[in-house]
Amino acid sequence: MKPLEPVGKVLNMETGILEPSERVTQRHISGMRHMYADTDAVSQILEDEGDRLIYEVHTVDLPEEEGLVLYGTTIIHPGRVGEEFHMTKGHFHTKRSRGEVYLGLAGEGYLVLQTRNGVVRSLPMRPGTVGYVPPMWAHRTVNISDEPFIFFAAWPGDAGHDYSTIEQMGFAKLLLVRDGKAIFVDNPKFNKTQ
Ligand code: S6P
Ligand code: ZN
């Protein structure tokens, strides 16, 4: 491993922007078409307003190597797709033995976790909440508020990101709005056999 220089950055706790900024990834609805339960609602949004920005991730530009700690912020913009709240794609770490820590900065949401067998747990996240992602759990975040839900995360450099397992199996629970409240319901499209 090449020796690295210590680096300090400034995190704007209200916007989630890291300065100096490094990698920024934007996730639009077209890239999450099949992740939302209501695919008709996705098509309608694409037709009415174009490719809606769902969330963005600001991360440090460091090699994905064992021994390093990577970190970044995620900003999930408020909104819904049908009855479902805006959310991240969600992933397992490719190395399943790698965990992660989340820190809520602004807005309100849930950290939803799931095992390979479809056991789901959820942690409400607010500014100051520290959410722990143990090894082996897939994780997704959901914005249940009307403002951006922003959090900081730090994870091992060699964790890697496996999106395809979650793309194929989905999460067993969906977070929907009903009568103005956020509720968890069973996902009819959940596919445990992956
Ligand atoms: C990385 C960490 C977060 C997510 C980010 C976006 O291990 O869990 O930085 O990458 O919240 O979610 P996703 O599922 O699109 O990577
Ligand atoms: Zn992760």
Image (tube, helix red, strand yellow):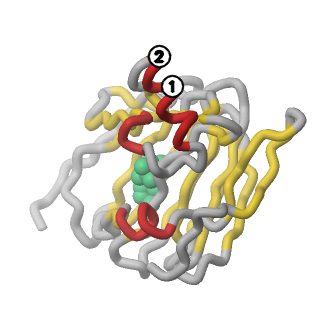
The quarter of the displayed image where residue 87 is located: top right
Q: Which residue is mark 1?
A: 45
Residue at image point 78% right, 40% down: 177
Residue 127 can be seen, yes or no: no
Q: Quadrant of residue 121?
A: bottom right
Report x, y in % for residue 36. Answer: 55, 47
Quadrant assignment for the C terminus = bottom left
Side of 9 relative to 177 (left or right): left
Percent coordinates x, y for residue 65 in the rendering? 22, 66
Q: Amino acid at mark 1?
A: Ile
34 or 25, which is in the foreground? 34
Quadrant for the N terminus, please: bottom left
Q: Above or below — where is 152 with respect to 179?
A: below
> Circles 1 and 2: CB distance less than 8 Å?
yes
Spot occupied by residue 35 in the image (x, y as percentages of width and height): 49, 51
Q: Name which residue lies at 38% across and 36% down.
A: 30
Ligand 1 is within 8 Å of the C-beta of the residue at disc 1: no
Relative to 33, say whether 145 is above or below: above
- The amino acid sitting under disc 2 is Glu
- Left/right placement of residue 74 relative to residue 19 reads right
Give the labeled residue for mark 2: 49
What secondary structure is marked by label 1? helix
Q: Which mark is residue 143?
A: none
Residue positioned 35% across, 65% down in the render: 164
Ligand 2 image-quadrant field: bottom left
